[in-house]
Amino acid sequence: MALDSGTGTIPIAKKVPTTRVHHGDTFVDEYEWLRDKDDPEVIAYLEAENAYTEAQTAQLQPLRDKIFDEIKSRTLETDLSVPARMGDYWYYSRSFEGKQYGVHCRCRIDDPDDWTPPRLEADTEVTGEEILLDSNVLAEGHDFFALGAFSISHDGNLLAFSVDTAGDERYTLRFKDLRTGDLLGDEIPGTAPGATWSLDGTHVFYQTVDESWRPDTVWRHRLGTAPDADVKVFHEPDERYWVSIGASRSEKYLMIWVGSKITSEGWVLESDDPEGEFRVLIPRREGVEYSVEHAVVGGRDRFLILHNDVVDGVKAENFVLAEAPVDDPSNMTLLIPHRDDVRLEDIDCFADHLVLSYRREALPRVAVWPLTSEGYGEPKELEFGLELSSAGVGSNPEWAQPTLRIGVTSFITPMQVFDYVPATGELLLRKEQPVLGGYDANDYEQHRDWAVAADGTRVPISIVRRKDLPAGPKPLLLYGYGSYEASIDPGFSVSRLSLLDRGMVFAIAHVRGGGEMGRLWYEHGKTLTKKNTFTDFVSCARHLIDTGVTAPDRMIADGGSAGGLLVGAVANLAPELFAGILANVPFVDPLTSILDPSLPLTVIEWDEWGNPLADKEVYEYMKSYSPYENVAAKDYPAILAITSLNDTRVLYVEPAKWVAKLRATKTGDSQLLLKTEMSAGHGGVSGRYEKWKEVAFEYAWVLDTVGLADA
């Protein structure tokens, strides 16, 4: 059924009652029929929604074109990355004007003692350049393209790479002889993205996924043999755990990692013995997470272990760092004790120093810790003089190198790439992300504010704006995520300038469920405390209104994936605070998904959300906040939901059902739009120009919704 709106036909999804019964509760789902994407009627409905969305937004095409041109004009389209040294080569990637995808290249090292990366010019030919892989060539003839594995053998002679041309995150693994440029005959379909070489380059380890898209098995492939001869070296039957494989930077060990949301386990094998048997590092225990890196300390091989086990009778929620002999990883000596205000996140090991990555005051930080002949020196935190900055370790493939590649950015500082020299303390700027068109960071400001949640918790808000905005409430885009301990850290965006320069303020609500304020920040926004994520966001919105930064008629809530669940729940909780809701691949029907163990990712998600199949309390709690199940007959803000037909993480059916129910239930005449990419996955469209067009589509809708379409 459809209604004529005057600007396109409004799609009205038919109702086909499906009954769901759990824990004595009956829920009648009238739109579950939309799950069958092989049904022509489902595709017809999605296409009708697309046609309606296009008709409703057709007048914004000139603005979309203008925003696209702005992004394009600010971007140095022909560019290259700072070369990273590995073996006998400098490796880097290129982008070219007019081409959607990147090109991977390398050139030989002239002087083995010179660690200064060559100054390559983007628009000139590089002497001795080898093109290793051109994704533009691989993408020809495909509507979607994603590069998965890109792994060079230790001798630099072979490349393992994988591609996905459907958007379903299942890749085909191929191999290339870099000496001749020839593709080898080996071809392995249906793999997960990665690939790890043995030390001698004779074997490659890769993963496959189960029917729920969970990486569950590690295989060993001997180059030159048929895939059906590949050896299964590890399989994890427990559906709560994902499996991955990699190598230590020292190249001495291969490591298989098995992890759920709250538990991890590592297995290790010497990389010069690829046909040997992996052995467990520390047996898994429910609720204990750990990671291991190999270091040589005082001439001895050691494993450095980050873990959150109990230390001195207290659970190390924010993790501690310990060392142990490689032949007895459980025999640990504490190196860095637990701190309530510092969340240890990672340890990188090099021949003569360690690099600690951690979080303090809701910001990511880096410290370099020298190794001496006796053991450990004094760690030094790197300072960059930027407010609300993010610092992180860049590409450092070599075990023994005199420099450390570091990336630094902020909301108003384009990405800067430094080489830090531990021996001297020098910070050498290698590159700053170019922003064309006369960008001046001094025209903008960023600062941290704090809202007070309903239970008294202080919630950080990051705010970015132009300095020259007039007084009074401003149009504002409030972004949030708040799940999986993911932190939304300061970062520069070329496309965001198109909002800021039109007078819009950009803000991030760092709500509980994320990781910005440490592990307990995450723990207090998951399972049976998940509603803190939503009420924190509402508290941030109210704070921004109460302090005069914005007003309800000019604020947009923005979130994607689990952040789409956030803004969907907020639309039910406090629709009066927002002019619009932008929801990308939104997880808005969580209870239906988490109740079905056959769906991708469901079982592993039980640690995040709880298991509503087994626990009535979890069922009732999830039902009380599920955006889809709590749609009511009331006025909602304007809503734009964007999804992808081939998404394997958040199925298209969730936003499709949500929009169908909203259209049949809500009151008022606010705009309600669904846009489905018919040949894309969870990450949306592929290709940088297509992504820019998608951003321009979203931003034009945002600007129109807050009255800035003519700005």
Image (tube, rainbow, N blue to C red):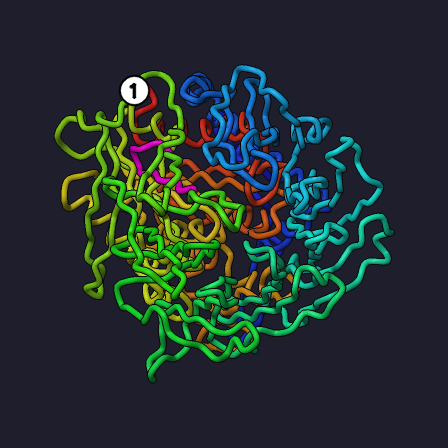
Percent of width and height locating residue 108: 61, 30
Q: Secondary structure at mark 1?
A: loop
Q: Magenta stretch containing residue 118, yes or no?
A: no
Query: Quick check: can you spot residue 51?
Result: no
Q: Is residue 346 left or right of residue 96?
A: left
Q: Which residues are magenta?
A: 405-415
**Which residue is at 49% across, 43% downward?**
395
Which quarter of the rendered picture does the N terminus lie within?
A: top right
Residue indicated by mark 1 = 711
Foreground of the two, 160 or 38 = 160
**Which residue is at 69% across, 30% downward?**
139
Few, some or many C-alpha atoms within 10 Å of disc 1 (few <14, some 14-19, many ≥20)? few
Foreground of the two, 408 or 501 = 408
Q: Is residue 239 above or below residue 160?
A: below
Percent of width and height locating residue 416: 37, 34
Name the amino acid, label 1.
Ala
Percent of width and height locating residue 452: 19, 57
Q: Is residue 109 left or right of residue 192?
A: left
